[in-house]
């Protein structure tokens, strides 16, 4: 077990996440992992609602369920902020003194 712990900690230092899957351990870049839709992320982490709610006899399910809900909410918030940022960028660009076609300052035309 100490060997697995060492591998997980080393991979994290390298920017990777390690998850346990049917065939063993799966290593992937954490920055890519979080780009997945929320339900796929939670599935890969064995923290989706269906999995968590099958282990009601283990009190650990309560925090696992909370983690799933927090991840879902954080992911929703990130998407909301990204969309708002893009909308604001487009709005600011459209209202700016820069040409929409070439990006140059309108004074240069």
Image (cartoon, rainbow, N blue to C red):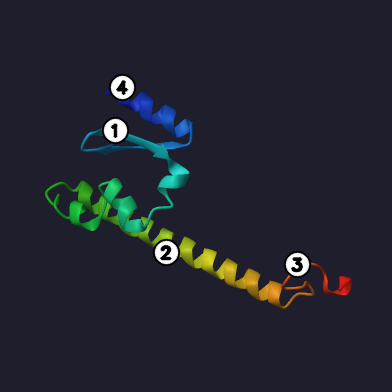
Residue at 17% across, 55% down? 53
Image quadrant assignment for residue 48: bottom left
**Label 4 residue SS:** helix
Q: CA distance from mark 2 to mark 1?
A: 28 Å
Side of 92 where 16 appears, left or right: left
The spot of residue 66 in percent (x, y) is 30, 56
The spot of residue 4 in percent (x, y) is 31, 26
Q: Are the residues tagged 3 and 1 within 8 Å (C-beta)?
A: no
Image quadrant assignment for residue 21: top left
Residue at 32% across, 59% down? 69
Image quadrant assignment for residue 24: top left
Residue ID for mark 2: 76
Residue ID for mark 1: 25
Residue at 27% across, 37% down? 20
| Pair 2/1: label in front | 1
Residue ID for mark 4: 2
Residue ID for mark 3: 103
Q: CA distance from mark 3 to mark 4?
A: 56 Å
Q: Classify 103 as above or below 19.
A: below
For marks 4 and 1 on the same chain, the one whose residue lies earlier in the sequence: 4
Q: CA distance from mark 3 to mark 2?
A: 32 Å
Residue furthest left in the image: 57
| Pair 4/1: label in front | 1
**Label 3 residue SS:** loop
For marks 3 and 2 on the same chain, the one whose residue lies earlier in the sequence: 2
Q: Are the residues tagged 4 and 1 within 8 Å (C-beta)?
A: no
Side of 99 where 51 appears, left or right: left
Q: CA distance from mark 4 to mark 1?
A: 15 Å
Q: Are the residues tagged 3 and 2 within 8 Å (C-beta)?
A: no
């Amino acid at each position: 077990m100490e060997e697995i712990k060492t591998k997980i900690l080393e991979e994290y230092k390298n920017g990777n996440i390690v998850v346990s899957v049917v065939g063993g351990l799966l290593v992937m870049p954490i920055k890519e992992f979080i780009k997945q839709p929320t339900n796929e992320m939670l599935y890969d982490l064995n923290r989706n609602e269906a999995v968590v709610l099958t282990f009601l006899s283990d009190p650990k399910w309560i925090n696992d369920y909370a983690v799933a809900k927090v991840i879902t909410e954080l992911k929703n918030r990130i998407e909301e902020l990204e969309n708002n940022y893009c909308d604001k960028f487009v709005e600011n660009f459209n209202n700016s003194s820069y040409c929409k076609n070439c990006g140059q300052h309108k004074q240069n035309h």
